[in-house]
Amino acid sequence: MANEATKTAKLSIEGEATIELPIYAGNEGQDVIDVGKLTSQGYFTYDPGFVSTAACESEITYIDGDQGILLHRGYPIDQLAEHSNYLELCYLLLNGELPDEAEGKLFVDTIKNHTMVHEQLNNFFRGFRRDAHPMAIMCGVVGALSAFYHDSLDIDNPEHRRITAHRLIAKMPTLAAMSYKYSIGQPFIYPRNDLGYAENFLHMMFATPCEDYQVSPTLARAMDRIFLLHADHEQNASTSTVRLAGSTGANPFACIAAGIAALWGPSHGGANEGVLNMLDEIGGVENIDQYIQKAKDPNDPFRIMGFGHRVYKNYDPRAKVMQETCHEVLAELGITDDPILEMAQALEKIALEDEYFVSRRLYPNVDFYSGIILKAIGIPVEMFTVIFATGRTPGWIAHWNEMISGPYKIGRPRQLYKGSSKREYSAKT
């Protein structure tokens, strides 16, 4: 640990000597008890899901779920969403400080210069079935990038790590758009470096060789905010997966592919997809009251998706920004007769006023609003998690780089074994 212990915990085990465990304090949040010496005493700790375990020391992101606070390098997410943009946040996550004007311009220019992917990747895409889920494609093609960039795979070289970070941030939107185009049988659209990051992504998604796509500034700003609000979220399942894979010395492309695989799970990155599936199940505004009652019934398995959050016990600070953006997008598009969006707005009103939801702090979260925005823009549900992965890439890279830059140990969780004790082999006849 970088700091000296502030206190000591004493663990008394019946019939054995008391074990003293150092306690360390972070700059924010809970103190942590260092249980490392328990192994030499013949004990492990038991913490399913690692919900009470700090597996690393980090300076990147801090969350206070009770207060609804999310800080990136100390900056509140609402301030970043209002005054910054996605690429500036990428720079902040990777470097620890906001860029000055010259640094920011150089970073943006560098990212734009890496947006192309190797032409042979086109052949890689054609190896997938047309109906393959885009996340399956992303797992494969991102991992395959390591086959094209042998020049920067030395994880102990800071310059290699920097180049790889730039390549991944730049190429993820290109690969994401390619996975969509492939699924609908349209030709790939090459990136345009005269466009902004989010604007370029939307252009690659919706333009065709025979018809250009003019990106609305409102939609581009909404897309940029979706990327920004998903850029990092501390030690979640996918980020921890990236760190665990990285602890083996695996190349960064493989580590990010592992993060994408973890994000694919419906309990993690698939939540905004679940919101749209739930609205499809409800079917119409006239059925909302019935489904609200089902959600309130503890014996009914139905749950309202996109409300509440495992970490935030207060209003998700990202949701406040997404709520404003959502209403801007719906106003820009003039959508007044979409039954899915009509249901979403009705559910939002109920959740903010109904005592059942308010008392349980089941506020609409970022997944609820981002799902509605993506639906309104015209992005299909199966692409939602791909967009999440694109936005989360700088956070994954920042955590991987933070770990690789200092002393680290290979991840090796322990277990509480409950299987058979040693027994002799005897063939069954």
Image (cartoon, rainbow, N blue to C red):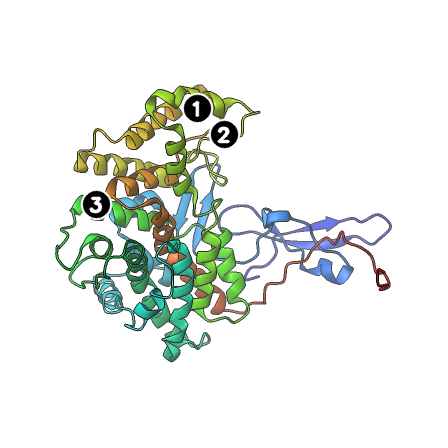
Instruction: Locate the C terminus and report the quarter of the image it occupies.
Output: bottom right
In this view, 379 is above or below 201: above
Comes first in the chain, label 1 or label 3: 3
Instruction: Please report the residue visible at 54 percent of the width from the left and 26 percent of the height from the top.
Output: 300
The amino acid beneath tag 2 is Phe
Q: CA distance from mark 3 to mark 2?
A: 33 Å
In this view, 111 is above or below 355: below
Residue 428 seen from this side: yes
Q: Are marks 3 and 2 in contact (CB under 8 Å)?
A: no
Percent position (x, y) of residue 319?
Answer: 36, 38
Mark 1, Cα crowd under 10 Å, few <14 / some 14-19 / many 20+, is: some
Q: Is residue 169 left or right of residue 194?
A: right
Residue carrying label 1:
291
Number of disc labels: 3
The amino acid beneath tag 3 is Leu
Comes first in the chain, label 3 or label 2: 3
Instruction: Please report the residue visible at 63 percent of the width from the left and 62 percent of the height from the top.
Output: 412
Q: Determine whether the residue tagged by mark 2 lies in a helix, strand or loop.
A: loop
Q: Determine whether the residue tagged by mark 1 lies in a helix, strand or loop.
A: helix
Q: CA distance from mark 1 to mark 2?
A: 8 Å
Percent position (x, y) of residue 212?
Answer: 13, 55
Residue carrying label 3:
219
Q: Is residue 392 left or right of residue 237?
A: left
Percent position (x, y) of residue 414?
Answer: 68, 58
Q: Are marks 1 and 2 in contact (CB under 8 Å)?
A: yes
Instruction: Please report the residue visible at 36 percent of the width from the left and 48 percent of the height from the top.
Output: 382
Mark 2, Cα crowd under 10 Å, few <14 / some 14-19 / many 20+, is: some
Front-most of 336 and 188?
Answer: 188
Front-most of 130 and 420?
Answer: 130
Mark 3 or 2: the one toward you: 2
Percent position (x, y) of residue 326?
Answer: 27, 37
Q: Determine whether the residue tagged by mark 3 lies in a helix, strand or loop.
A: helix
